[in-house]
Image: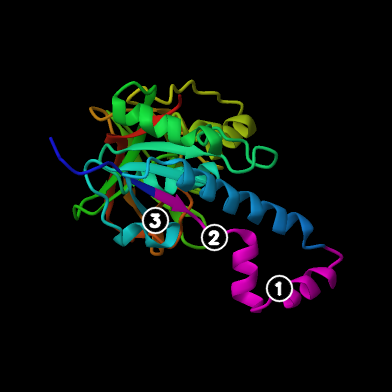
């Protein structure tokens, strides 16, 4: 047992107001730019104030002997999380997806700073309840969901992990050309790319694809399975449309072999963090062994 007091890592992302200030330098310049487009600064400042208030509330309520650290979304790829850390993600649901792939079992408390504008599918805890939730985690009495993640592994050994989905396609708006295989079924396809979604991601991008294709797939966020969805598969003399949706798990991964130059694979919508997927490379995608330990109460 460690003699050190618990450490809470508070994770945030820049608010709209902070991004606007970074671009235009001063509040007055931001106000002028928005006014020139018939917009006001009021709502932007209100959301910023809600975020700042939430962070302050969490910090102030933590036991004085507990250690605190902070990380922004941009710092996550180089932030050193410790095995016993408690993670408090203050912001939108997407922030929890951003931090999940950098963790190794550390519990995450998702804190919703502004329920009026944030759905809070993952960020369910109010700022005033965050300290109690973190204390419950430390005491071993918190309710925790072990949410399945998705992993993609290239034939080179490079990997990507996502909480919501993995995307495979072309880096531009060109059609993606590849061969797809699941078990003993395989075909060559031309499409707008494909995603492999977890049960968590099934409420986002995958949900819109299922609605458009009228092909619902039931996914429990904690079940160790994922589902793949091909976007706008095109039938031709050389390409098919029979393998457009299905379930995958660690024993039955989806294999995709690139037949294009300019192919990419990225996770959770972060296009800057990608794997190259040029002609001849093969990637296997399935439910990951890694999971998000999400505190829900």
Q: Earlier in the sequence, mark 2 or mark 1?
A: 2
Q: Quadrant of the N terminus?
A: top left
Residue beneath disc 3: 70
Residue assigned mark 2? 14
**Numbered tag placed on residue 3 in the rendering:** none
Over which residues does the magenta segment extend?
Answer: 10-39
Element at badge 3?
strand
Mark 2 or 1: in front is 1
Residue 264: give x, y in percent of width and height: 39, 58
Q: Which residue is mark 1?
A: 27
Q: Position of residue 68 (x, y in %)?
A: 35, 51
Placement of 55 over or under 212, stated as above or below:
below
Q: Earlier in the sequence, mark 3 or mark 2?
A: 2
Q: Residue at x 30, y 58 (%)?
A: 79
Mark 1 is surrounded, within 10 Å at the Cα level, by few (under 14), some (14 to 19) or many (20 or more) other residues, namely: some
Separation of disc 2 and disc 1 at Cα?
A: 16 Å
Q: Position of residue 101 (x, y in %)?
A: 34, 46
Residue at the spot 48% in from the left edge and 51% down from the top edge: 269
Q: Residue at x 43, y 51 (%)?
A: 11
**Can residue 238 be seen here?**
no
Secondary structure predominantly adopted by residues drawn in magenta: helix
Helix, strand or loop at label 2? It is: loop
Tell me how far mark 1 sits from mark 3, CA to CA: 25 Å
- Residue sitting at the far left: 1
């Amino acid at each position: 047992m460690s003699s050190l007091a618990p450490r809470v890592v508070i994770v945030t992302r820049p608010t709209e107001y902070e991004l606007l200030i970074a671009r235009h330098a001063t509040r007055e310049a931001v106000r002028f730019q928005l006014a020139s487009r018939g917009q006001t600064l009021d709502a932007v400042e209100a959301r910023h104030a809600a975020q700042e208030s939430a962070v302050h509330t969490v910090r102030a309520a933590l036991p004085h002997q507990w250690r605190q650290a902070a990380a922004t979304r941009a710092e996550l790829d180089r932030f050193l999380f410790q095995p016993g850390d408690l993670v408090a993600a203050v912001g939108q649901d997407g922030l929890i997806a951003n931090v999940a792939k950098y963790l190794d079992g550390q519990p995450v408390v998702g804190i919703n700073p502004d329920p009026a504008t944030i759905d809070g599918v993952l960020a369910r805890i109010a700022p005033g309840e965050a300290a109690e939730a973190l204390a419950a985690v430390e005491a071993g009495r918190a309710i925790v969901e072990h949410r399945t993640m998705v992993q993609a592994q290239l034939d080179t050994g490079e990997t990507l992990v996502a909480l919501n989905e993995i995307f495979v396609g072309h880096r531009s708006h060109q059609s993606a050309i590849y061969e797809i295989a699941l078990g003993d079924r395989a075909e060559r396809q031309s499409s707008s790319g494909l995603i492999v979604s977890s049960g968590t991601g099934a409420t986002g991008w995958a949900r819109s694809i299922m609605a458009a294709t009228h092909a619902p797939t039931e996914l429990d966020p904690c079940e160790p399975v994922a589902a793949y969805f091909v976007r706008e598969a095109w039938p031709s003399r050389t390409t098919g449309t029979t393998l457009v949706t299905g379930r995958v798990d660690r024993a039955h991964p989806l294999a995709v072999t690139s037949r294009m130059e300019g192919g990419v694979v990225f996770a959770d919508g972060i296009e800057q963090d990608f794997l190259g997927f040029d002609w001849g490379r093969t990637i296997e995608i399935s439910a990951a062994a890694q999971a998000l330990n999400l505190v829900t109460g």
